[in-house]
Image (cartoon, grey):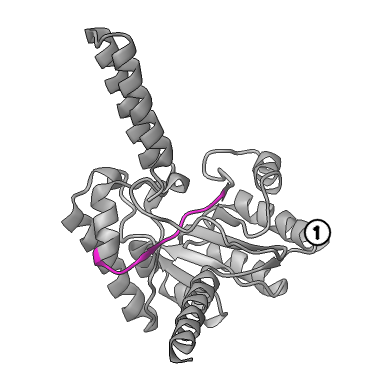
Amino acid sequence: MKHYPFILFYIFCNVFIYAFQGTFWVYLFCFLMFFAVIIWGSFDIGLNYFLNSIIRKKTKAKEVALTFDDGPTEFTPKFLDLLKESNIKATFFCIGKQIEKHPETFQRIIAEGHTVGNHTFSHADNTGFLSTSKMIEEIEKCDEIILKTSNVKTNLYRPPFGVTNPNIARAIKRTGKKSIGWNVRSLDTVIQDENKIYYNITKKLKKGSIILLHDTSEKTYNVLADLLVFLKDKKYSTFTIDNILTAKETKAFNTRVSLNEKKNT
């Protein structure tokens, strides 16, 4: 885990307490600061504080990943039509109860070559307060619905709201999932202005970026239409999240083979 910023903060607190002789207000200040850092680590998945999440692909190529959360919904077929027209594959992190509502759409996602990931069964607002056992139940129930609906298994998991904590970290480990984050957040669920959403994405875009979108509204569909034009004009290709894991596994395999060959020579 990348705890370096927090280790530095811990050292700073100790020096601060020592310098000011550990008065009550100094201890209170440090406690409040430490609490704030923990909250920060919980809500910023990119910090990798409680667990390691994939937030981008290390690549020199001009390629990005389009990922969609919270579906399938009544809007998803339009998204699929648009992606099909542009011959682009994306990754859909689906909610179990939404799959139950739209099984045909979920089957279409897979049939058209897109990648799917687990986004819990209910995407509850209190996800960050659930116990480890309850989180495991949420993940496994979504897995069961995915398997029942499409005969597909996935090891990809995206935490709802990007929230992580020790319970969620343990649940992800015990269910054998890979946590997937992002480094380009569109904020399409909170911003109403399509131009602002589009700008949020394009201004942050880099090689290997993972873009967070939601296939849940007409406005995001319109943004996607413009974004696909932008990607084509800027000569960006796209990849799906399983492509990252496959590349890592291939690299690890080649490394093992290379080491074995050196031992045998």
Horizontal and vertical percent for residue 95?
Answer: 38, 61
Where is mark 1, residue-wise?
A: 234
Q: Residue at x 39, y 81 (%)?
A: 152
Secondary element at image label 1: loop
236 sits to left or right of 121? right
The image quadrant that residue 203 belongs to is top right
Magenta stretch, main secondary structure class: loop
Residue, far front: 265
- 10 Å crowding of disc 1: few (<14), some (14-19), many (20+): few
Residue, far right: 233
Horizontal and vertical percent for residue 175?
Answer: 27, 67
Image vertical order of residue 118 relative to residue 181, above or below: below
Task: Looking at the picture, tell me which residue is in the foreground, 114 or 259.
Answer: 259
Task: Looking at the picture, tell me which residue is in the foreground, 225 or 152.
Answer: 152
Residue 242 is inside the magenta segment: no
Image vertical order of residue 93 relative to residue 2, above or below: below
For the question of whether residue 36 can be seen, the reply is no
Q: How many marks?
A: 1
For the question of whether residue 55 can be seen, the reply is yes
Instruction: Please state which amino acid type lies under the numbered disc 1.
Output: Lys
Q: Residue at x 53, y 39 (%)?
A: 190
- In this picture, which residue range is highlighted in magenta? 174-183
Task: Looking at the picture, tell me which residue is in the foreground, 128 or 229.
Answer: 128
Q: Residue at x 32, y 44 (%)?
A: 125
Horizontal and vertical percent for residue 212?
Answer: 55, 53
Task: Looking at the picture, tell me which residue is in the foreground, 61 or 195.
Answer: 61
Image vertical order of residue 123 relative to residue 197, above or below: below
Horizontal and vertical percent for residue 9?
Answer: 38, 29
The image quadrant that residue 149 belongs to is bottom left
Q: Residue at x 29, y 16 (%)?
A: 17
1 sits to left or right of 60? left
